[in-house]
Image: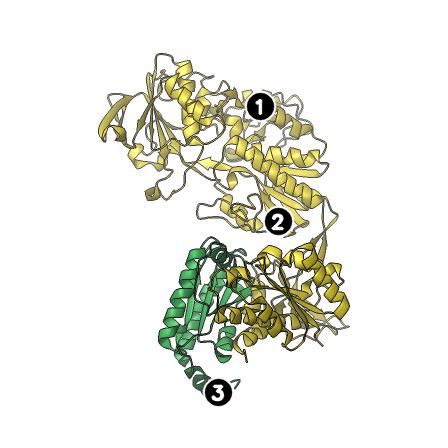
Amino acid sequence: MDFEPKIVAFVCNWCTYAGADLTGTSRIKYPVNVRIVRFPCTGRIDFMLLLKAFDEGADGIIVSGCHPNDCHYTSGNFHARRRWMIFRNLIDFVGIDIRRVAFSWVSAAEGAKWAEVVTDTVGKIKELGPYSEYHQISKSFDGGAK
Amino acid sequence: MSRIGVFICHCGENISATVDCERVAREASLMEGVLYSIDYKYMCSDPGQNLIKEAIKEHNLNGVVVAACSPRMHEPTFRNACAEAGLNPYMCEIANLREHVSWVHEKGDATTQKAIDLVRMLVEKVKNNKPLLPITVPVTRRALVLGGGIGGIQASLDIANAGHQVILVERDPSIGGHMSQLSETFPTLDCSQCILTPRMVEVARHPNITLITYAELESLEGFIGNFKAKIRKKAKSIDEKLCTGCGLCTTKCPNKKIPSEFNEGLGTRTAIYIPFPQAVPNKPVIDKTQCTYYTKGKCRLCEKTCPAQAIRLDQEDEILEFDVGAVVLATGFNVKGTDFFPEYGYGNYQDVITGLQFERLASASGPTLGEIRRPSDGKIPEKIVFVACAGSRDPAKGIEYCSKICCMYIAKHAMLYKHKVHQGNAYVFYMDIRAGGKMYEEFVRRAIEEDDVKYIRGRVSRIYERNGKLIVKGADTLMGGKPIEIDADMVVLATAGVASPKAEELAQKVHVSYDQHNFYAEAHPKLKPVETNTAGIFLAGSCQAPKDIPETVAMASGAASKVIGLFSNSELKRDPSIAVVNRMPPPTYTTCVGCGLCVTACPYQAIQLEDIKDRKGNVVKRAAYVNPGLCQGCGTCVAFCRSKSIDIEGYTSQQIVAEISALLNDE
């Protein structure tokens, strides 16, 4: 059987969630592998939740919110972007495959773009295969949860 | 103990065509904590909602998951239904099976499996939900309107006429704004002052409006319904109660050569001045930067002249404080000066002027008493050139947008010129004519057809002086780019409309967002055009983007109706999805260490550190406190918190972790 990756999408309520709604309203198809978790804002996303998702068995993660300057809460997406810049260096350093996290901006008007982001990410993760190494890495963390 | 009901909607065939709804209901019934599950053709219909209400009562449910369309669509519907059955509405969650599943995937096992996953995810979330109560905050029924142009005037009158108090603050000595500078208005050519001044007078004598001119906002604190505004009332150096507005002082003032702001520098004023004859209030102010007494320490002629002895040279700025419930920003716009354009002479040619300066030349109250005379030598120009899009729609100049009003006022200017100088020739260089609006296109056609204004489609590359003439070089793109040279007597640049000079500073004071051009950002470009992202602060007119008078007035009335709506209740209810710190009695019981990271992270200044004191009054601990009136629920603080002491209701870490675990563990 073909590998069907599990992908969790962390999206903000105001832009990307609404954008994904528009994808539906426009009847644009995309792979079934993605599951959306709704946040008020990308600024709310504690990036430890990304590790939690990998820990629970996600093969890939999408983080998406409003374009810079379009944040419903003025600046949440800037916090998310800055946090991601730091966090990706950190997880890269500990050996987590940062290719498995896609960070993008999808506005409420970009239904087609959401389908693109999902399709691209699913294709990329399919190439990378299941993320079974994560647990070996997490085991090596001193005092790790598992 | 969870007693959860799951309700799967077919949405006609919208969901059931690709998702096996019966199977989803069956699988849901096997989930831990689910007591009841059912699928139905239209869950949002009355019978569908009744199904939910009955089930809540019959099975004593303490959580509900409705698997239907997007929560952005029917979350309020289903939450209300739950509330009607006696369940706290925040114990209801929506799984998005339509927009996120059935409409975007093909029919099949995997699609139904995704639907089941989403239901399981929301079931696990609901288990971690807690009943929430709407937050109520009191409302002060007094509005602050910043800016006394036509937008601010309209908003103030509308709010005041609805019976609420209004504080109208204007930066200049008189209200009236740019509209009072205009000679005539398009597309009717009626006189601007004639339609504006009755409104200005109405503002001044309205019992519900407190007009404060020559004043600026010093600071604004608080939140919707409960703002505290500090207004700096600049010293006018006169006693307003004693002054009769006779104007004798302005005739005696020896300092007569100051360029008049009202006349856009084309006329002069004195140091003690009334900006224009119809000014409201019609009382002078002393410009401290120009007055000989303030700059050199002697003169006091006005003081000696004043028959009412109303001059107060020792007057100081006053700070006035007001409690207000809502704020309307109507601070307007400005236009670029001619000095912005190197190719048009850097503002060095006196006879190259802006559209606003032309308004003053054409105005009966202007420096030429309405005759079109060029500034350099007072001659009547025989040939006049109007340049549209001077700066606007020019990314190279950093202004990509269309200033919107120029096409119309150029047509008006050209017509006014032709009506006053019959033998003259008027040329207009334009890119496109944008005349969308009632009677607008007809107005432009009138300029071209009846008044013989020559429209040339092309941009002007350069303007320079030769033998006392202004040579305007351009190209006619409708004639294959044929080069054109016009030896004009005067040139009017329709310079770009830009944000007010202090727009950014004000935006930062009141915490509203603004775009890269410093125009204020509306909450939604289509559906919330007068709201800002800060609750309780509204926009009117061209502080949001360049606008003409009818649009400004419509927007001002829109903002006023929002304010009146807000004031229609003595308290307001807000969504309780806000941040909370895990504090409980006794006061020291919290994991918050008072580091203050959340305080700096909050874009709404909703969080502050509180001192926790013992009985002797010693500070024993500091902990964060979230002001429920200010918090908008973005959750930025949650991601910042190092000790996980702050969380956001409805999106708690516990709820999200439960969702993630449920999603990824489908066995």
Mark 3: which amino acid?
Asp
Residue denoted by label 3? A142
Q: Which chain is yellow?
A: B
Q: Which chain is green?
A: A
Residue denoted by label 2? B220
Chain ID, mark 1: B
- The CA distance from mark 3 to mark 1 is 77 Å
Mark 2: which amino acid?
Leu
Rendered image quadrant of residue A124: bottom left
Element on which disc 3 rests: loop
Residue B584 is at least partly visible in this image: yes
Residue denoted by label 1? B195
Q: From the viewer's perspective, is B410 left or right of B244?
A: left
Q: Residues within 10 Å of mark 3 (few under 14, many from 20)?
A: few
Chain ID, mark 3: A
For the residues bearing labels 1 and 2, Cβ distance under 8 angstroms: no
